[in-house]
């Protein structure tokens, strides 16, 4: 469970990021097009996620936080049979 100060940091960071986004994307958020509104809500959800990651990872380096935000698994967390440099390309297997 997150400490109270971490939760407070999440809220303040999200409030700041969301406020800026809402100012820039107010037309998208009030669009008549449901798909446009959905994209705008998705962006707000991503800002909430980033706020949580940044608030919860004060002990990590900037590079490690970037990897967490981008969803890049840390090599030591990967199963031993997974190559971290493999970008998921699936080609034909050679016999």
Image (tube, grey):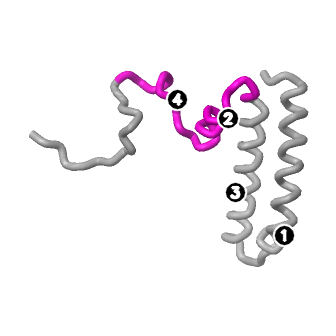
- Image quarter of residue 2: top right
The quarter of the rendered structure image containing the N terminus is top right
Whether residues under marks 1 and 2 lie with C-beta atoms below 8 angstroms apart, the answer is: no
How many numbered marks have been drawn onto this rendered protein structure? 4
Whether residues under marks 4 and 2 lie with C-beta atoms below 8 angstroms apart, the answer is: no
Label drawn at residue 74: 4
Reading the image, the residue beneath label 2 is 62
Label drawn at residue 26: 1
Whether residues under marks 3 and 4 lie with C-beta atoms below 8 angstroms apart, the answer is: no
Helix, strand, or loop for circle 4?
loop
Looking at the image, is mark 4 or mark 1 earlier in the sequence? Answer: 1
The quarter of the rendered structure image containing the C terminus is top left
Residues at marks 3 and 4, CA–CA distance in whole angstroms: 25 Å
Looking at the image, is mark 2 or mark 3 earlier in the sequence? Answer: 3
Tell me where residue 69 appears, x and y as whole percent.
64, 41
Looking at the image, is mark 1 or mark 2 earlier in the sequence? Answer: 1
Looking at the image, is mark 3 or mark 1 earlier in the sequence? Answer: 1
């Amino acid at each position: 469970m997150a400490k109270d100060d971490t939760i407070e940091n999440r809220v303040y960071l999200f409030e700041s990021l969301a406020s800026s986004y809402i100012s820039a994307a107010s037309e998208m958020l009030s669009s008549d097009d449901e798909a446009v509104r959905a994209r705008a809500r998705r962006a707000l959800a991503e800002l909430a996620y980033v706020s949580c990651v940044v608030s919860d990872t004060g002990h990590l380096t900037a590079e490690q936080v970037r990897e967490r935000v981008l969803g890049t698994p840390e090599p030591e967390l990967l199963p031993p049979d997974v190559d971290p440099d493999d970008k998921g390309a699936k080609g034909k297997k050679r016999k």
